[in-house]
Image (tube, rainbow, N blue to C red):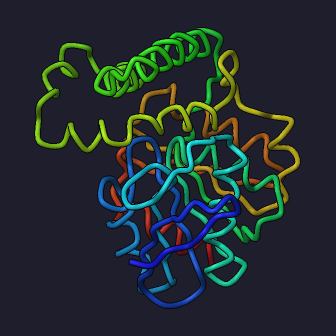
């Protein structure tokens, strides 16, 4: 493990593997280097790239100074890119994709950006569900009910409430609770409390070559934003990975990334 220090002094834990042009991976909600898809994706890309995975602030081995704004996480990503040589290709998953798209509208050294199913809202009913989720999340975190915050995310994402309740107490649940406060950071990357719509005006300013991906077996509420992002970013490509869901398989994803990054 190595570390990178962000602009506000937050120490970020990183892992580096492989050789070749730098790629930085940005995780989605509840994930970090020890939990989630990044390790498998890094392993697949390592033959072609030097892959940087990092724990976003408040997760895993990274610190958190307790004063959050989306701009702080953009600075975090910029610090990792600087450590990687000042320019890097980026892959970002789910809520991490929303963060990376906002970062790509600034000049932090992103050479090419690939995103997978950024969970913006494309319909008013979905935006309303987001507002309800943020209200529930905010209350749970304010009252120290981390498990309820995690459950709120899972239900918002489409998991049956009964199934989520059955997961409480399972071996991995404590890992989710440990990073539950960062769910507020992901919500902020998607939008404010009232608007999680695709930020079309912001995306129109992105000058970075961009690939927006979705899975052919994912629900429409995740596929539609991927198409909308591709339509909003000038010159962006859209591609569907047949047979894939939101939990995309690294062996299927990696060839698409390698081709795009080349």
At a point 69% along the width and 24% down the height, the residue shown is: 192
Tell me the residue at 40%/72% (across/down). 42
Q: Position of residue 254 (x, y in %)?
A: 44, 68
- Image quarter where the C terminus lies is bottom right
The residue sitting at 75% across, 56% down in the picture is 104
**Image side of residue 149 versus residue 174, left or right:** right
Residue 66 in the image, given as x and y percentages of width and height:
56, 43
Q: Quadrant of residue 147?
A: top left
Q: Is residue 151 left or right of residue 225?
A: left
**Quick check: 106 above or below 193?**
below
Quarter assignment of residue 112: bottom right
The N terminus - image quarter: bottom left
The residue at the point 32 percent across, 42 percent down is: 178
Q: Position of residue 203 (x, y in %)?
A: 80, 43
For residue 135, above or below residue 106: above
Given residues 249 and 31, the one toward you in this image is 31
């Amino acid at each position: 493990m190595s570390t990178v220090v962000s602009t506000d002094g937050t120490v970020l834990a990183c892992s580096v593997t492989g050789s070749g042009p730098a790629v930085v991976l940005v995780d989605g909600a509840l994930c970090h280097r020890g939990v989630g898809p990044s390790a498998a994706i890094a392993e697949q890309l390592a033959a072609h790239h030097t892959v940087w995975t990092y724990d976003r602030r408040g997760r895993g081995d990274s610190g958190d100074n307790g004063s959050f704004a989306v701009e702080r996480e953009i600075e975090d990503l910029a610090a990792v890119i600087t450590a990687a040589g000042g320019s890097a290709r980026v892959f970002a998953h789910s809520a991490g994709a929303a963060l990376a798209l906002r970062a790509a509208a600034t000049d932090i050294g992103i050479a090419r950006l690939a995103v997978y199913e950024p969970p913006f809202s494309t319909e008013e009913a979905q935006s309303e569900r987001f507002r309800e989720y943020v209200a529930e999340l905010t209350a749970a975190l304010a009252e120290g009910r981390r498990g309820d915050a995690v459950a709120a995310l899972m239900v918002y994402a489409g998991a049956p409430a009964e199934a989520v309740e059955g997961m409480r107490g399972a071996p991995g649940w404590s890992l989710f609770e440990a990073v539950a406060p960062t769910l507020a950071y992901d919500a902020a990357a998607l939008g404010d409390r009232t608007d999680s719509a695709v930020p079309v005006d912001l995306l129109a300013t992105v000058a970075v070559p961009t690939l927006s991906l979705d899975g052919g077996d994912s629900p429409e509420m995740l596929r539609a934003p991927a198409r909308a992002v591709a339509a909003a970013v000038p010159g962006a490509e859209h591609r569907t990975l047949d047979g894939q869901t939101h939990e995309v398989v690294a062996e299927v994803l990696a060839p698409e990334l390698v081709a795009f990054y080349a």
